[in-house]
Image (cartoon, rainbow, N blue to C red):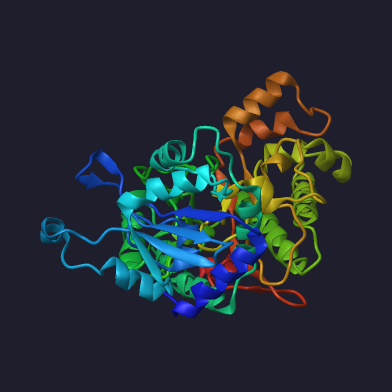
Amino acid sequence: MFVDTVYKNRRRVLKHKTGSGLIWLQGNQEVGMNYHGNPFPYRQDSNFLYFTGLTAPGLHLLIDIDEDKEYLVGDDLTVDASIWVGDLPLLSEHAENAGIKQIIPAKELPQRLKQAVLSGHHIHTLPPYHGYQSDAIREYIGPEHPDSMELIHAVIQLRSIKEDREIREMENALTITAELHRAVMQACDAGRTEQEIYARAMEIVLKEGGRLAYNAIMTVHGQTLHINTYQNQLKEGQLLLCDMGAENQMHYASDITRTTPVNRIFTTRQKEIYQIVLDTLKESTRKIRPGVEFKEVHLSAAAIITDGLKDLGLLKGDTEEIVEKGAHALFFPHGLGHMLGLDVHDMEGLGETFVGYNSETKRSETFGTSNLRLGRTLEKHHTITIEPGIYFIPQLFRKWKEERKHEEHIAYEKLTNWMDFGGIRIEDNVLVTADGHRVLGPHIPKEIDEITSL
């Protein structure tokens, strides 16, 4: 964790932005995978991490804004429990590390919250995403307790603007991710399985003391956007799409995608589609700077992809009209990028509408662009992903063709021969600087000649 003053300052600003009342942040608990004693891999709540730096399960943070008091809530480990997990820090030690002066045993939390409700205090809570969080809110505060919009907006304002120390941690995570992606590219040979290559990448992550920031995508079926199975054997002529990012020991995420032809040899078609995606990534990155609306960068990326596919005879007509109608989304059905930080989709648990949009930038209802997680105007020290892609999705193709959807723009007769292509996505992580941008982390090969020469 960082030094305690980092967390004390963050909480001080949080109190100021929230206004008044009582803030209750729930840390995460261990959750049983198939029974209580066999838990899922544990990871602390990112908001709790941001304001305390504490990773231990079963903790809560109470902040009384009006009295300017902070309390860490939890219990010391029992002797019986320590037999199984060893000696762990006391609650008082956790509090000292986080710069919190007062502690409360967990059994006192319900009564404190109920008393606060009876006294007319407004209790600020964030949207729960675990059942035990929802149960606690219902039991301690009431079944109709709403999420606090004041707290949601205050947290987003703080976490959206990355501190220099956070950027360093993200780049540390990217050093692990860069190494694993190079290993994946070098192992992308016919006869190997996705699982074998995945295992090589995980060896690097674990060796560096990290973990995955999200479920990895390692597939020769890149047209399936979030596939998480790894049983296929690589064959010559296929593409391996690897979307894999490490989380470092400070819990900051990275999110990188590279697409490599099996044996690192591009076919003519693969090279043509790959170059369109790479050009889109480069041009989109060039547009990144403070004051730019990311929704417009996405639409510009859609136009570049459209022009490239028009050159191949797969789309036809006016580019602006194609993008406005959403016909391009047959090939590019997702958004260009999202916020990145302690979460791979940073703060998504607080609501994409609040994180990625605001009163000036509204979410599109058009298929494809509606999946854009980030549309708002960019600010200095936003950290984002840029991840254009082109996909040939058989089920979507069949559906649109049967509906004769956008047939004035889509060359369905030519597309029939492309349905075994798969998909290509190339992704970088980018920092918005004072006057432009910087691609974060070490260089990861993405040029065609870089890949073929590996």
Q: Is residue 63 above or below residue 89?
A: above
Q: Is residue 155 above or below residue 389?
A: below
Residue 442 shows up from this direction: no
Residue beneath the point at 81% across and 42% down: 323
Q: Which of these two is toward me, 122 or 428? A: 122
Residue 365: image location, x then y, percent:
75, 36
Residue beneath the point at 56% across and 42% down: 421
Q: Quadrant of residue 105?
A: bottom left
Residue found at the very far front of the displayed protein? 119
Residue 56: image location, x then y, percent:
32, 61
Residue 334: image location, x then y, percent:
65, 44
Residue beneath the point at 36% across and 57% down: 59
Residue 355 shows up from this direction: yes
Q: Quadrant of residue 179?
A: bottom left
Residue 245: image location, x then y, percent:
46, 61
Query: Which quadrant would the N terminus be assigned to in this image?
Result: bottom left
Labels in figure, total: 0
Q: Which of these two is toward me, 337 or 161? A: 161
Q: Is residue 240 above or below residue 185?
A: above
Residue beneath the point at 43% across and 63% down: 71
Q: Along the horizontal axis of the image, is 59 left or right of 324?
A: left
Q: Along the horizontal axis of the image, is 11 left or right of 132?
A: right
